[in-house]
Image (cartoon, rainbow, N blue to C red):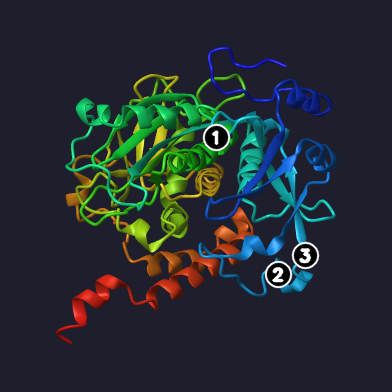
Amino acid sequence: MTEKNHSNIRRFTGGDGEVMDWLRSNGVEKIRVEWMDMHGIPRGKRVSLNTFDELRHKGVPFAALLFAIDLQARWLRNTRFGEEIGFGDFYAVPDLNSMRLLRHEPNTALCLTNLHWADGRPIAEDPRNLLKSGLDQLKELGFAANAAPEFEFYFLTSDFQLSDTGENAYAMLKRWGFREEEQALIDAASAHVDYEACNYEFGPGQFEITVEYGEAMDIADAGHLFRSTLKETALAMDRRVTFMAKPYTEAAGSSCHLHFSLVNEDGSNAFADEHDPLKISQVCRHFIGGILAHFEELAVVFLPYPNSCKRIAPESFAPISIAWGMDNRVAAVRAINVTPRGTRIELRVPGGDICLHLALAALVAAGLDGIKNEIDPGPPAQGHLDLDASIPKITTDWSKLLDHFDESAWIPKAMGADFFELFGRIKRMEHQRIISTVVQEERDELIEMI
């Protein structure tokens, strides 16, 4: 077993027969066994060392109904997860490749899981299983995938109010006012990610942290845990962190740009081509072509709530144009070609509210289709695309995004019929609740004069 000597991440890198000795030698007394639902919300149990040893092969049982709920735990009928199985269990089987020691919770390790039924069948809707399936298909074509998210979030007061005033991106003086809190957040998150940079962003009390590039599944796991760890660390300080896409009407939204590239079997960058005028390969072009071809169908995965669409606005640097461009920040897909090793694409549409595993699974599914069918994305768009009426725009009507998803004949084939049905139904349930709820702003607008 070896661990990176330049990293604060203390991950388990051995085999099944070594894990219990590793846990004991590191003073671990409890293990957080976790999985994420299709919202990206971490769910799990804290188990004792002995319990983990007993259940790590079969898996830790959970009520399967938990996978068929919305954000407020309202559950759906007729989903395979509830009354059909007598409200029985599924099993979260630990993935030892994800095991790590926590920094903000003493004597504790955390292990992510893959979800299975009692007979060992994987649950197709599980975001980790979905991403693994896509990465396996890439492997069959001779590619591995690398990725990195850029996280933006708000650091708030304990009652979810803004903790600062004004907008002043990258201002070091603004950052200095939160230096102790920032350090605590970074220290805790370094159990999961090696960060490249942290800066004060546009919004009051808004920060951005970028993480090192890495293998796509590892990065999806690390990014998922990064967010939950920041939220837990803020709670311990009697503060709050939110990754909500647009938490305040007048303040900047929070993005989660996804950087992505493919690696050939010889270790070279499959997206780079020194002989191409734009220095990008046909594989890269076709991958982009797949994203653009299926963007409207998949948009609700990248913009998973009505609030997500409120971040998408002209001249906000949250792209509204379904297009690609070379180093163009107002295109949905930005291609970056500064060096052959660093050539990659950046999907700039997602906000901080995405389920990272699902978003990457959708990105991979679309790109795979682009590669297999050699989909041409056309020439790169240039200039200020927000003002170009000839380029199709992303709708901010969330119900239309749901329609595009529901009407897709491609998603059930590419990502599975089980995922397609359950995800669509959960989103429809959330939409119906939201549109039928009278909110305070609506009451303020109408109650006196109408």
**Residue 293 spot, x, y in % from top left:** 43, 52
The residues tagged by marks 3 and 1 sit, at their Cα atoms, a distance apart of 30 Å
The single residue placed furthest to the top in the displayed view is 5
Residue picked out by circle 2: 82
Q: Are marks 2 and 3 in contact (CB under 8 Å)?
A: no
Q: Amino acid at mark 3?
A: Gly
* Residue drawn at the location 34% of the way across and 22% of the way down: 338
168 displayed left or right of 340: left
**Residue 190 spot, x, y in % from top left:** 50, 27
Image-quadrant location for residue 1: top right
Residue picked out by circle 1: 222
* Residue drawn at the location 37% of the way across and 32% of the way down: 181
**Residue 330 spot, x, y in % from top left:** 26, 43
> For the residue carrying disc 2, how many other residues have a C-alpha within 10 Å: few (<14), some (14-19), or many (20+)?
many
**Residue 287 spot, x, y in % from top left:** 47, 40
Q: Amino acid at mark 2?
A: Gly
Earlier in the chain: of badge 3 and badge 1, it is: 3
The residues tagged by marks 2 and 1 sit, at their Cα atoms, a distance apart of 30 Å
The residues tagged by marks 2 and 3 sit, at their Cα atoms, a distance apart of 7 Å
Q: Amino acid at mark 1?
A: Ala
Earlier in the chain: of badge 2 and badge 1, it is: 2
95 displayed left or right of 265: right
Earlier in the chain: of badge 2 and badge 3, it is: 2
Can the viewer see residue 407 in this picture?
A: no
| Residue 277 drawn above or below residue 253 | above
Q: Tag 2's secondary structure?
A: loop
* Residue drawn at the location 38% of the way across and 51% of the way down: 244
Q: Tag 3's secondary structure?
A: loop
Q: Which label number is shown at residue 88?
A: 3
